[in-house]
């Protein structure tokens, strides 16, 4: 078992903990914040998976696109929560 | 490359520790602002160190074997890190502002300067 497999398992545990906060968290801002944290952890996990399976740089391209798209999603949901018109 | 491998193990350890601390911070703190503080800072710091470990190990493989695909890996990982660093801080700011404007109160807060500024 390589060091990257251990890192991937620990990251999955972190993601499960933050997803529990999405499910139980009271109110929309707490859920949005937990979702944003989960997105960061998923991007890092994709980088770890790219390193775990040798010579697969396309996982990192997926991670870059995922980071930027989840950022757009977070900004729009935050705008919706604070009650702005689009 | 034993020293580089040891360095990457240390970086992986630091990164995983801070990611775990940030995840537990989501459950330990009382309201959305303190949770945001814990989660955003710790996961950003942990991600920086995990990506540094990837860079160190890829550079080590490239230095030994001369495999040019490792350099592609390094550049793409740095791009992912830049995207994370910019978007994490900005989205944390947006979430905090949205939470305050939607009427979410800080737990056990004595003074709320932002509230007073809006009433003046």
Image (cartoon, coloured by chain):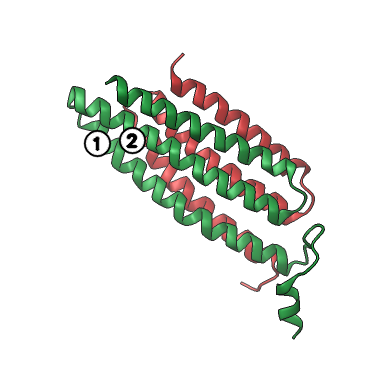
Point out the residue furthest to the bottom here: B120
Report whether B21 appears left or right of B3: right
On screen, B74 above or below B113?
above
CB contact under 8 Å: marks 1 and 2 = no
Q: Quadrant of residue A13?
A: top right
Report whether B60 appears left or right of A77: left
Report whether B59 appears left or right of A5: left
The chain under label 1 reads B
For chain B, the rendered hue is: green
Q: Residue at x 49, y 29 (%)?
A: B13
Mark number displayed over residue B96: none
Percent across and percent down for residue A44 are: 48, 38
For chain A, the rendered hue is: red
- Give the total number of marks visible in the rendering: 2
Q: Residue at x 30, y 36 (%)?
A: B73
Q: Residue at x 39, y 33 (%)?
A: B53
Q: Residue at x 75, y 70 (%)?
A: B112
Point out the residue furthest to the left here: B66
* Callout 2 crowding tier (Cα within 10 Å): few <14, some 14–19, many ≥20: many
Q: Which residue is mark 2?
A: B55
């Amino acid at each position: 078992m390589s060091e990257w497999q251990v890192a991937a398992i620990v990251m999955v545990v972190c993601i499960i903990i933050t997803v529990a906060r999405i499910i139980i968290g009271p109110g929309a801002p707490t859920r949005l914040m937990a979702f944003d944290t989960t997105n960061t952890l998923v991007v890092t996990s994709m980088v770890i998976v790219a390193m775990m399976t040798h010579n697969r740089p396309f996982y990192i391209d997926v991670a870059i696109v995922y980071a930027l798209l989840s950022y757009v999603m977070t900004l729009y949901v935050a705008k919706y929560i604070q009650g702005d018109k689009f | 490359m034993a020293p580089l491998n040891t360095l990457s193990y240390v970086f992986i350890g630091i990164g995983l520790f801070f990611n775990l601390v940030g995840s537990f911070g989501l459950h330990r703190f009382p309201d959305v602002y303190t949770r945001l503080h814990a989660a955003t800072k710790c996961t950003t710091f942990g991600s920086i160190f995990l990506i540094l470990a990837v860079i160190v190990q890829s550079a080590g493989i490239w230095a030994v074997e001369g495999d040019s695909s490792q350099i592609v890996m390094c550049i793409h990982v740095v791009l992912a890190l830049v995207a994370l660093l910019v978007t994490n801080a900005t989205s944390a700011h947006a979430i905090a502002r949205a939470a305050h404007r939607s009427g979410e109160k800080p737990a056990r807060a004595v003074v709320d300067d932002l509230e007073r500024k809006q009433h003046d």
